[in-house]
Image (tube, rainbow, N blue to C red):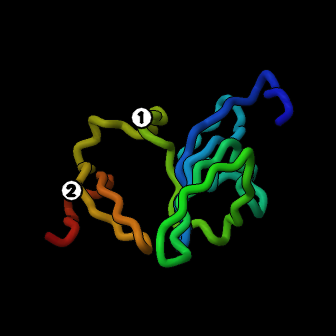
Amino acid sequence: MKPLASDEKLATVMVYTHHMFVRGEIVINENLRASIWLRTQNVLNYIHLLKPNVLLFAGAQPKSISYAEMFVSVNEVIAFHVAPPGEDPIDFDTSELNRVMQFADILLGSFTMKGKIRISTQKRLGN
């Protein structure tokens, strides 16, 4: 890996596809939030992950594999987030009265994510 530029940082992220789960590091601009990185213009066709740990589910038994680096097609990604315990700064007004954080279980292929989703106080997710 080339040394980081003065305006770059490493962010540890989790990447999910239908057949694997990857925890690794990405190089992003210092002032960019990693959690929205895939929605920016900086992303190419592949996510370049450094020091990835991979859980592969494409066989009878899951396999755990580690690499020095790996490329994952953006088209294959079904979920992407900052790896715990890391977090990005909040980008919304927490005192806004017409919004609420509601618990949600999200099914992503073989995975279930438990978290919160920010929605209008006029709406509810199914109970």
Nearest to N terminus: mark 2 or mark 1: 1
SS at mark 2 in the image: loop
Q: Residues within 10 Å of mark 2 (few under 14, many from 20)?
A: few
Per the image, the residue denoted by label 1 is 85
In the rendered image of this protein, does residue 90 appear above or below residue 56?
above
Q: Residues within 10 Å of mark 1 (few under 14, many from 20)?
A: few
- Badge 2 vs badge 1, beta-carbon distance below 8 Å: no
Residue 121's label in the rendered image is 2
Residue 56 place in picture, x, y as percent: 55, 65
Residue 72 place in picture, x, y as percent: 69, 61
Residue 27 place in picture, x, y as percent: 71, 39
Give the residue displayed 28% in from the left and 41% down from the top.
Answer: 96
Q: Quadrant of the C terminus?
A: bottom left
Report the Cα–Cα distance between label 2 and label 1.
Answer: 28 Å
The number of callouts visible is 2
Which amino acid type is marked by label 2? Thr
Q: Quadrant of the N terminus?
A: top right
Which amino acid type is marked by label 1? Pro
Give the residue displayed 23% in from the left and 55% down from the top.
Answer: 103
